[in-house]
Image: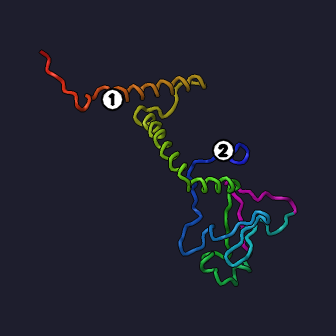
Amino acid sequence: MVKEKDIKPHVPVWDKSEGNPDVFGRSDFIWDAQTDCYHCPAGKQLQSRRRNFTQPRSVVTNANTIIYRSSQPDCKDCELKSQCCPNASFRKIARSIYEESRDVARAINQTSEYLQSRRDRKKVEILFAHLKRILKLDRLRLRGLTGAHDEFLMAATVQNLRKLAKLRGQDPPDHRIAAPA
């Protein structure tokens, strides 16, 4: 959606690659798009393909990631091994096949427009949570698109009527009610 339709993703990016503060995270490695590899802080390459197989294999995993690995001899003699891969014989980095789109979303997350859209989204999501929890609309009971449309329209109408009843049920702040004569 980001590349083909030029849609700006105003969504948070969950990134678990920066785990332990004593160990290098993925941000410490430099991505090189032309050679399709990462470069470690020591300057060595992490590649997705290290050897050729007789039958071609896909480098994309079931989780839609590509695993980039360093070579074991490079890591064995490296002076930064204790900061890079202290509990393994070589370093692995998983890169999503959608990483370019995730980078666009990370850049948008730093803007004031993202903060505003997050506030606006929160207002809408609270209404959906209210529909699910208070009005018990956790699943649709009518069939088809028109049934779902009708059921959702009724639930939204009930929600708006509840709001209206709360607003109309309160007296204005400076208005006093006189006792009936």
Q: Is residue 62 visible?
A: no
**Secondary structure found at label 2:** loop
Residue drawn at the location 61% of the way across and 56% of the way down: 107
Residue toward you, 170 or 80:
170
Residue range of the region highlighted in magenta in the rendering: 54-70
Residue position marked by numbered label 1 in the rendering: 167
Can residue 107 be seen by looking at this rendering? Answer: yes
Q: How is this picture coloured?
A: rainbow
Magenta residue check for 86: no
- Contact flag, marks 1 and 2 (Cβ < 8 Å): no
What residue do we see at 46% from left, 28% from top?
156
Q: Label 1 neighbourhood size at 10 Å, few (<14), some (14-19), many (20+)?
A: few
Residue 141 circle label:
none
Please tell me which residue lies in front, 124 or 181: 181
| Residue 39: percent from left, percent from top | 71, 72
Q: Which mark is residue 7?
A: 2
Q: Quadrant of residue 83?
A: bottom right
**Lateral position of residue 100 relative to residue 170, left or right:** right
Q: Residue 56, image x and y in percent?
A: 84, 59
**Which residue corresponds to the image point at 62% horizontal and 67% vertical from the top-left?**
27
Which residue is the extreme one toward the front? 174
Of the 4 image quadrants, the one containing the C terminus is top left
> Split into 4 quadrants, where in the image is the N terminus?
top right
Numbered disc 1: secondary structure: helix
Find residue 164 and report its image quarter: top left
Residue 115 rendering spot, x and y as whole percentages:
51, 50
- Observer-nearest residue: 177 or 90? 177
Amino acid type shown at disc 2? Ile
Q: Looking at the picture, which amino acid does disc 1 mark?
A: Leu
Q: CA distance from mark 1 to mark 2?
A: 38 Å
Q: Earlier in the sequence, mark 1 or mark 2?
A: 2
